[in-house]
Image: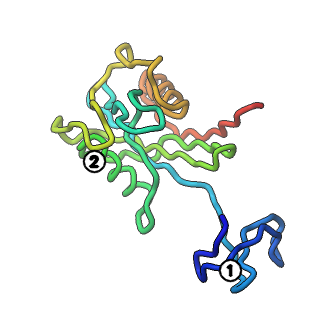
Amino acid sequence: MKYCANCGNPVALRVPEGDDRQRHVCDHCDTVHYQNPRIITGCLPVYEDRVLLCKRAIEPRYGLWTLPAGFMENGETTEQGALRESWEEARATIDISGLYTLFNLPQINQVYLFYRGHLTNLDFGPGLESLEVELFTEQQIPWDELAFPVVNKTLTHYFSDRRENHYPIRSEDLIRRR
């Protein structure tokens, strides 16, 4: 960050009074610009014994399969964001069953939330960010073509939990070791 979003003057990286870490601070108007993790919210859409996946039409990970998800928007709840992303990416309408997985990825400043849900109908298709949208059984999942580790982990948990018919909320820190 080089300039203040409030007044347009240059910012400096320093520890503001009463804080314990460096922030971008405007030397002109004293606005502190906080940079916080981004929240990605999405759905694990299920129909009978199948899961709905989207093949990405955008970077990163173009052409790989993912669950419908994306960045949360201001003014919406995480559940509303998950439903919006499911519509935008898969034209899918879903009844949410509840929060299912939460992943912290501190090395890239992201938090992922996936809600488990059921497709209300089979009237779905690719949105602007998807090349294809398809239902997969566990055996049909293109495991080697999944876009993100959080998708792999969510699907692995789901199929394991499905066998037990027990779906606890799963929370995990995915910390990349250097």
Q: Looking at this view, name the residue that lies furthest to the top.
A: 139
Q: Viewer-nearest of labels 1 and 2?
A: 1
- Identified at 42% across, 28% down, the residue is 165
Marks 1 and 2 sit apart, C-alpha to C-alpha, by 37 Å
| Residue type highlighted by circle 2 | Trp
| Residue type highlighted by circle 1 | Thr
Foreground residue among 131 and 159: 131
Indicate the quadrant where residue 33 lies. Answer: bottom right
In the rendering, at what x and y percent does residue 55 appear? Answer: 35, 30
In the rendering, at what x and y percent does residue 28 appear? Answer: 72, 85
Apparent side of residue 72 relative to residue 173 in the rendered image (left or right): left
In the rendering, at what x and y percent does residue 60 appear? Answer: 48, 37
Q: Which mark is residue 31?
A: 1
Q: Counting residues from the N terminus, which is met first, the one under dot 1 or under dot 2?
A: 1
Q: Looking at this view, name the residue that lies furthest to the bottom.
A: 29
Q: Callout 1: helix, strand or loop?
A: loop
Q: Can you say which quadrant of the picture contains the C terminus?
A: top right
Apparent side of residue 138 relative to residue 148 in the rendered image (left or right): left
Name above or below for residue 52 compared with residue 88: above
Q: Which mark is residue 87?
A: 2
In the rendering, at what x and y percent does residue 82 appear? Answer: 39, 50
Name above or below for residue 64 compared with residue 34: above
- Identified at 72% across, 69% down, the residue is 24
Q: Callout 2: helix, strand or loop?
A: helix
- Identified at 50% across, 24% down, the residue is 156
